[in-house]
Image: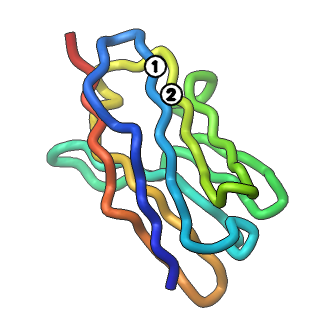
Amino acid sequence: QVQLVESGGGLVQPGGSLRLSCAASRSVFSFNTMNWYRQAPGKERELVATITNIGITNYADPVKGRFTISRDSAQNTVSLQMNSLKPEDTAVYYCNARNYVMNSWGNGTLVTVSS
């Protein structure tokens, strides 16, 4: 297994920005995909953004054009830059790392978008 630790959540006003980071205990290239999910109160967990081991990225429709996923192989981190935040982006954001033999989750970081 791998340990994943998220950071960077907090309270931000609508229209603001936040950058989430996920630190992995091993190389980010050891995973087929690294993903950010979110879970809002009373809702199911949903996939927000994905980056593959060859750098292909994909985004959920609600965040396209506003969120950017990236990785730093030297630091073994994956980040989620979130711009133009909306109240409906409020959720606990989870880092996920996956390959053929494992599927690991972090504990999540809370993002609250409110004025």
Q: Is residue 79 left or right of residue 17?
A: right
Up/down of 18 relative to 48, above or below: above
Q: Residue furthest bottom?
A: 101
Q: Which mark is residue 82?
A: 2
Image coordinates for residue 44, horizontal then vertical, percent:
28, 54
User: SS at mark 2?
Assistant: strand
Q: Residue furthest right?
A: 54
Image coordinates for residue 19, horizontal then vertical, percent:
49, 32
Q: Label 2 amino acid?
A: Met
**Local crowd size for mark 1, using a 10 Å CA cut-off: few (<14), some (14–19), many (≥20):** some
Rendered residue at 69%/49% (across/down): 71
Task: Give the distance between the C-alpha atoms of the residues marked 2 and 1, in whole angstroms.
Answer: 5 Å
**CB within 8 Å, label 2 to label 1:** yes
User: SS at mark 1?
Assistant: loop
Q: Quadrant of residue 114?
A: top left
Q: Which mark is residue 7?
A: none
